Amino acid sequence: MRHWYLASLLLLAACSSDDKETAAADTSGSGADTSDTSDGSGTADTTEASGDTTGSGDTTEASGDTGPTFDLTAPLSWPVGEAGPFVVGYRHWETTYTSPGNGEQRTIGINIWYPATEKTATSPNYLNLALFRDTDVYVDAPPAPPVYPNGKYPVWAHSHGSQAYGGSSSDLMRHLASHGWVAVSPDHTNNLFNQDVNPRPLAFYVERPADVVVAIDQLDAVNTTSWLPAAADTSRVVISGHSFGSFDAWALAGGTYDTTLIQWKCDSGEFPDCTPERVALFAPGFREPRAIAVVPMAGRMGADWRAAAGLLSVTIPMLLMSGSNDDVGHADTFAQMTGRPVTWVDFAGGCHETFALGICSTLNKAKGYGLVNTYALSFGRQQMFADSSVDAILDGTQVVSDLVTLQKQP
């Protein structure tokens, strides 16, 4: 635990430093991309919101006599703020693909959390580092059959922040898996806790969104094996991202770029690998057609990247999440999204790491995770299944907490 704590402090310091740099850039009128902030990382022992209360998949009760009961034939009746009935299984492997950014071979880690029926003896160490051990997740646990009406697992994909890792928001990934979802998150090679490249190449801003797409594709690969009892439904996916990962979420949602601004960045020496061909890669954008909704957390697509109408290019539903102690420009972003299906939740006292690492002196970790999990799962169920039971949470008529400020467009 001590090693984890020291690592967390180092990551928090990195985040704080980057946030100050972003704030300075914003005051100069550059509209800095706050997704460039280092987001810290998640860690194993962040179990308050979702870990210890999960039961096994073949039971109808998650936490003994005091917990909620679950009708396994009616998953949309399960309380979104509570861990679901399933144990959380986990698998990790690496895959290699051709980078669309530079044409080279790129190898990334794939992290998958899924509903399982029973625990195994092994828990993962994210990035193979013991300080990121997740004792609420079980490697190779037997998968539980899908419980949703279409007979498939709903899919959630996540992009981690700068210098973090695929499991950095593992609390949310566990919460989703305990409710019968399959969650997948890549390790963004060359921008990890133990492996970072500086200065960042321009190709990397193409590769990170591509990593998420490849991670989703990997679910199709495992669907052809005997590992999962039925296919994960990759035809319709919710995508979230934290900090720098929110930049990826915006890109995959259809945010458009201004190549003139990108060329200006190249001319100013910001990137070491600029070519006209590489700049041109941004012109069509990176819209992922399988994304039906996105959840950017503590980050945005900055004005120094996007076209004038870059935000309005996003037409799929969006849930913005932010903390009051981490101004990443969501108020400005929300104001510019007039006419688009956008909901914005802001958590009083929330910090940049409320959405991943959990360290925040002004918002209790368990409360922060609980709010993130409640609103994320509500949004996912509403978009994936047209679940009207969560509408009151997402339109603000049901008060989840007095710490939440909720606004909607249109």
Image (cartoon, rainbow, N blue to C red):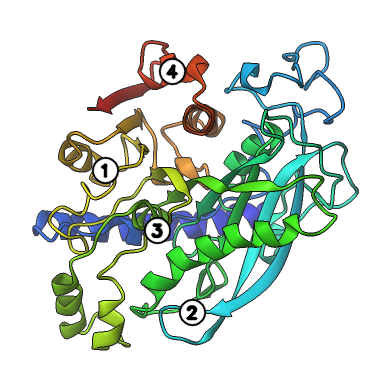
Circle 2 crowding by C-alpha within 10 Å: few under 14, some 14–19, many from 20 = some
The residue at which mark 1 appears reads as: 327
Please tell me which residue lies in front, 400 or 392: 392
Q: Quadrant of the C terminus?
A: top left
Please tell me which residue lies in front, 362 or 66: 66
Given the image, on which type of amino acid does mark 4 rest? Asp
Nearer the viewer's eye, disc 4 or disc 1?
4
> Left of 353 or right of it: where is 313?
left
Marker disc for residue 99:
2
Q: Look at 24% across and 58% down and name the residue there.
A: 22
Q: Look at 56% across and 65% down and name the residue there.
A: 214
> Left of 334 or right of it: where is 358?
right
> Left of 396 or right of it: where is 292?
right
Task: Report, in whole angstroms, how far the alpha carbon at label 2 lies from the one at label 4.
Answer: 40 Å
Q: Indicate the position of residue 120 as horizontal and vertical percent values.
A: 89, 46
Secondary structure of the residue carrying tag 3 is: helix
Secondary structure of the residue carrying tag 1 is: loop
The residue at which mark 4 appears reads as: 391
The residue at which mark 3 appears reads as: 248
Nearer the viewer's eye, disc 3 or disc 1?
3
Residue 401 showing in the rendered view: no
Query: Does label 2 or label 3 sit earlier along the sequence?
Result: 2
Query: Does label 2 or label 4 sit earlier along the sequence?
Result: 2
Circle 4 crowding by C-alpha within 10 Å: few under 14, some 14–19, many from 20 = some
In the figure, residue 37 lies in which quadrant?
bottom left
Query: Does label 3 or label 4 sit earlier along the sequence?
Result: 3
Secondary structure of the residue carrying tag 2 is: loop
